[in-house]
Amino acid sequence: MSDVKVIAVAGKGGVGKTSLAAVMVKLLAENFPDKKILAIDADPAVGLSTALGIEVQTTIDDIRKEVVSTAEDGDTKSALELLGEARYRIFDALVEQDGFSFIAVGRPEAAGCYCKINSYLKEVIGILSQNFDYVVIDGEAGIEQINRRVMEKVTHLLLVTDSSKKGTQVIQTINEVAKELVMYEKVGAIANRLPSKEIINLLDTGEIPVLTGIPSDGALAEFDLKGENVFYLPDDAPIVVGAKEALTKIGILS
Ligand SMILES: Nc1ncnc2c1ncn2[C@@H]1O[C@H](COP(=O)(O)OP(=O)(O)OP(=O)(O)O)[C@@H](O)[C@H]1O
Ligand SMILES: [Mg+2]
């Protein structure tokens, strides 16, 4: 049994999942230069690559299509079986960066085939996790990927919310489902984009412990505007400080 730590970031749309996942990859790469770190963009809407300053060539969906179309008996075998026979192809899609590797699920063109790529993604997470020490997954907004057991192997579940009622409700719903469908060891909430410090005490996250509160940071918006990646963020940027606190409290960083 490997003791890989699989960290997934989930929550409502637009709360800062991708930004936080990217900062976490940066922190892990800095703190564990001798460990193998993998960043997975599991959101078909894409974003983690930009936040990490990566240009994506091949995605998991490209491999899925390729495997299905090149297989002679593609009609009779399921894409998942074929994937098992072509494991090495997944490794071809890894982008090697300084200090970490990256892979993106990609965007299926045909509407309605997200479930196919999701079951594929689940297998890919399983296969790749065996070869890494730390995996950070930037999930799709909402509960779909938890429901479809894509996140089954996640060990540390980070639920991001803003200060809205909707945000805290979504993370509580995700946690309820995750208790059944995810084998996580630890769960915690990150309250992001807070209009004031005090508001953190008013958030109702139910039984999910709040790991950190991150203020709304105007500099980050400006950063985003310029399309800069997180490696340019200063160590004292609120989102970096917050991500560090969250990873420390959940037992990843010491
Ligand atoms: N603490 C913060 N202060 C100010 N802006 C922030 C903060 N955190 C994130 N943002 C900004 O909010 C926007 C959405 O962030 P991000 O893309 O990380 O969210 P997301 O949850 O991944 O969204 P989606 O559900 O669309 O994938 C971005 O423009 C980002 O720069
Ligand atoms: Mg995102």
Image (cartoon, rainbow, N blue to C red):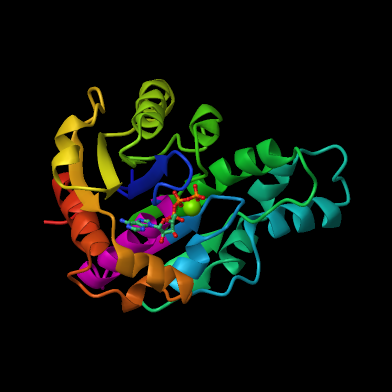
Locate residue 156: give its quadrant: top left
Vertical position of residue 240 compared to residue 158: above or below: below
Q: Quadrant of ligand 1?
A: bottom left
Residue located 18% across and 39% down the image: 200
How many marks the image carries: the answer is: 0
Q: Nearer the viewer, residue 18 or 67?
A: 18
Residue 33 sits inside the magenta stretch: yes
Vertical position of residue 157 compared to residue 222: above or below: above
**Dividing the image into 4 quarters, which one contains the N terminus?**
top left
Q: Main secondary structure of the magenta part?
A: helix
Residue located 62% across and 38% down the image: 119
Residue 241 appears at what percent x and percent y? 18, 61
Relative horizontal placement of residue 147, taking residue 179 as reference (left or right): right
Residue located 52% across and 44% down the image: 140
Residue 221 sits inside the magenta stretch: no
Is residue 25 visible in the rendered image? The answer is yes
Is residue 100 visible in the rendered image? The answer is no
Vertical position of residue 35 compared to residue 144: above or below: below
Residue located 25% across and 37% down the image: 188
The span shown in magenta is 17-38
Residue 203 appears at what percent x and percent y? 23, 31
Residue 42 appears at what percent x and percent y? 53, 50
Relative horizontal placement of residue 231, taking residue 206 as reference (left or right): right
**Dividing the image into 4 quarters, which one contains the C terminus?**
bottom left
Vertical position of residue 237 compared to residue 66: above or below: below
Q: Residue furthest left?
A: 254
